[in-house]
Image: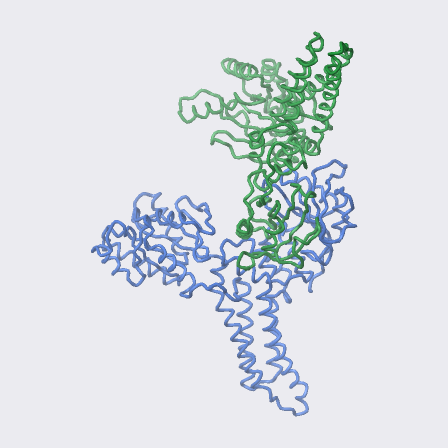
Chain colours: A blue, B green
């Protein structure tokens, strides 16, 4: 560890804020039992209680005035979340009572915990590595099945194991090289070059595999933003409602950031899709409508997928075809995907001339025939959205180990650069000292991900994203 | 017990909804361990674990797919909140994860708990009586020191003990009367009449004491609504801000129910004051302003205290004096209290003629001289508000046993009526049978409060006010 361990006692409400049946206040640190016992009156003092036992009692303030009846669960170091002595107090979940208890505990000598400080201590005390700590926040914020599964797998050490394995292999390569260096002065030949080169090739390929998982991993973790575009009255709101109407694992409503854009989140294929219904795209001289169009365009410029909705019962004006194609080209130029859906198939038979004309004009982008009213074609639409979100691949049940985090991705890129340099040096017969230097750099980059090598600044920026009490 | 005990297993999230470090899912009922063990994988099955022990493990769905790492705390019947076998699962506090675990537990055979159902079971299983069950909800919803202290005292059985003592005394009176009835046929004289009459007098006086505590008890529990009235620009908003500016135990902002009325809650003297800043009272022809005035008047008609604010730097138009006096009379006619404060004492010296004129005109209602800007006179203003809220009495540190609940108040009134009838019958020499009948009726009324005598309807209406998970 590079940092001084902090052992002062911290406390925070670990449950969400609000009225509920129970609130939990977490206390952790050297004086956790001493501090808790100043307020807790039960059959036995908590300091004398065995680890992993629950105790009913009352909790009183510094004047001995009771605040609430509580259940205190005792966790003794190192068998606690933080690795320190810890107490979790369950009290009645009212905001007033919860706050009074926390204030009392702070008055008894506990410091108010910072965001993520319990998890930070778990990391500093070697209970978990940094990828696992990051997974805690991801798990709490997960809003889809995929986000949940990848964060849980990372929490349980799948990524750590993969990275540790890679580090072990690189250490063995370094061992071979250093063996040669030791004997170099004796004129000893470096005969293991090809073996080291092969090891490095395998390592690069493993890093590449992880790096390539990032695009999908990011989608798993953060979801996909879909901008819904189309002329007014083409059925955008009906389409949104149709997505929300079905019985899904998770459907949440997010208030729009502007009055003009309606946002909804929906889970398709285990992925979170954040759909925005942007204002119509037609030209207008009304300043309010113009502002709506401007915001819609901004949203369109930042989406992962553009879903362009057309009305199958109304022929497109040639100018509309041109502007739609321009929109698609613009979005694709940014690397985002496009999907065209022709709505109201229930009103206009697919063989109808308008439908055929639209389908022909947008055939490169599927031109799916759907009805937001009868849900015809919806399964196919959802399937295509999931496919586009995953960059053409199909979501698998078991997703394997994935990179979901920009910090990990950037460190892996640096590890790869050093590995490539090391391999080139090996192949071109450079001195083992050069090779070992690059290998050490790549080991450091991998160590950064796990938190074996990192700085207080990096730690602070990671744990600042946590909630208080975790 | 009058009701069939329900022993099926119920489950609910007991912590507030939202993202936090920890969520707690509570499971209670005959199959609590069986159901929890279907998902929980730890060192030992929970069914084999001793009561009051905590167990770390993973929790998986019906296909064995892990959902989260959890800590399960085991409470064995009867030593649990409900009196039944119970498990409390602490999981990572994300909404998605929490919901997935609850859904899985429901799939394993637990029924989703209704609002207050855990506490209802605690009552039905004889762990607590009805006044204690009601105190749980009051404690959770308490937002001031007084509300907190009275609900905690009730939760810990202070009211129950008082009522039980009263019931025991009445039972002993009934004993005396029935003794007489047994010997009546033998011509035995009822010699204990004066003793019974004295017992009943004492009982009535105790009930009266409880009844008279209700007015203050209600204020302790529910707080006080204060309508802030005054012409525009008299400084109503500044006054509200001044109340909120000071460092207080509890200050919460409640969004107004209408756009025209700003509401804020503030704790003074341990009491919750709900202040509403109503729209100005001046006449207007603007329809929107008229609507604002109408709503302000409605609020004024429903307040506990009217706080009329005047501007000490501006003479009142005689018509304004009349309309203000009319307002005060109207509010007082409803039984609400009035307090007049003259603002801007920092700008206008109190000896100034305007100030003196206003103070004279409103001298019956204190006419306190204050400054919302410098806070001059504020301590006095707050003191007067607390005094008015408590009906002239001063809030004491130890408040004794209080009635805070309308249901208790109405049952006590019925108990009193029957006691008065019984006493009259005793004094007028009526037959012991009459007296015993009335005494039984008053015992039943007291039993209703404790829940010894009640109906399913009463129970349902009580527990419907609870949150889910309690």
Relative to B422, residue B396 above or below: below
Relative to B43, residue B27 above or below: above
Figure label count: 0
Q: Nearer the viewer, residue A60 or B452?
A: B452
Q: Nearer the viewer, residue B365 or B399?
A: B399
Q: Nearer the viewer, residue A154 or B73?
A: B73
Q: Nearer the viewer, residue B216 or B427?
A: B427
Image coords of residue B36 (percent x, y): 60, 52
Q: Quadrant of the C terminus of chain B?
A: top right
Using residue B435 as the reference point, say whether residue A350 is left or right of it.
left
Using residue B468 as the reference point, say whether residue A63 is left or right of it.
right
Image coords of residue A389 (percent x, y): 42, 61
> Which residue lies at the image location 63% right of the left edge and 48% below the top edge?
B88
Quadrant in the picture for residue A440: bottom right
The answer to whether residue A115 of the structure is visible from this angle is yes
Residue farthest left in this picture: A353
Image coords of residue B293 (percent x, y): 46, 23
Relative to A241, residue B464 above or below: above
Q: Quadrant of the N terminus of chain B?
A: top right
Relative to A105, residue B380 above or below: above
Using residue A60 as the reference point, say whether residue B364 is left or right of it.
left
Image coords of residue B130 (percent x, y): 64, 31
Residue farthest top in this picture: B428
Quadrant in the picture for residue B396: top right
Quadrant in the picture for residue B286: top left
The answer to whether residue A445 of the structure is visible from this angle is no
Residue farthest bottom in this picture: A187
Using residue B189 as the reference point, say whether residue A253 is left or right of it.
left
């Amino acid at each position: 560890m590079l940092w001084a361990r902090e052992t002062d006692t911290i406390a925070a409400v670990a449950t969400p804020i609000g009225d509920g049946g129970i609130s939990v206040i977490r206390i952790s640190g050297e004086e956790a039992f001493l501090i808790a016992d100043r307020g807790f009156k039960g059959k036995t003092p908590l300091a004398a209680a065995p680890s992993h036992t629950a105790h009913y009692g009352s909790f009183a303030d510094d004047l001995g005035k009771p605040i609430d009846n509580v259940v205190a669960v005792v966790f003794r170091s190192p068998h606690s979340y933080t690795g320190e002595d810890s107490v979790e107090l369950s009290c009645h979940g009212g905001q007033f009572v919860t706050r009074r208890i926390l204030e009392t505990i702070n008055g008894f000598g506990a410091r108010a915990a910072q965001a993520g400080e319990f998890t930070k201590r778990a990391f500093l005390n070697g209970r978990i590595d940094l990828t696992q700590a990051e997974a805690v926040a991801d798990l709490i914020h997960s809003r889809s099945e995929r986000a949940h599964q990848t964060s849980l797998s990372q929490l349980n050490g799948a990524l750590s194991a993969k990275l540790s394995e890679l580090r072990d292999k690189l250490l063995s390569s370094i061992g071979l090289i250093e063996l040669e260096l030791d004997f170099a002065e004796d004129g000893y030949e470096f005969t293991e070059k090809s073996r080291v080169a092969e090891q490095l090739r395998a390592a690069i390929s493993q890093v590449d595999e992880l790096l390539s998982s990032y695009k999908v991993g990011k989608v798993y973790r953060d979801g996909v933003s879909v901008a819904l575009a189309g002329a007014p009255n083409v059925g955008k709101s009906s389409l949104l409602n149709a997505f929300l109407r079905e019985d899904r694992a998770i459907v949440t409503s997010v208030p729009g950031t502007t009055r003009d854009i309606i946002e909804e989140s929906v889970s398709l294929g285990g992925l979170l899709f954040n759909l925005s219904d942007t204002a119509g795209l037609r030209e207008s001289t009304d300043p309010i409508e113009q502002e709506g169009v401007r915001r819609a365009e901004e949203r369109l410029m930042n989406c992962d997928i553009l879903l362009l909705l057309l009305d199958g019962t109304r022929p497109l004006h040639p100018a509309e075809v041109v502007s739609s194609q321009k929109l698609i080209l613009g979005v694709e130029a940014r690397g985002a995907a496009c999907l065209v859906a022709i709505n109201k198939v229930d009103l206009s038979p697919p063989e109808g001339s308008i439908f055929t004309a639209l389908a022909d004009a947008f055939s490169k982008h599927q031109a799916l025939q759907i009805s937001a009213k009868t849900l015809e074609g919806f399964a196919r639409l959802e399937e295509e959205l999931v496919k586009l979100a995953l960059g053409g691949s199909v979501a698998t049940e078991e997703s394997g180990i994935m990179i979901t985090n920009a910090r990990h991705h950037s460190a892996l890129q640096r590890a790869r650069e050093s590995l490539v340099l090391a391999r080139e040096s090996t192949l071109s017969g450079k001195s083992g000292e050069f090779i070992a230097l690059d290998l050490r750099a790549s080991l450091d980059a991998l160590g950064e991900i796990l938190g074996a090598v990192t700085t207080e600044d990096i730690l602070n920026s990671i744990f600042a994203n946590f909630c208080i009490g975790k």
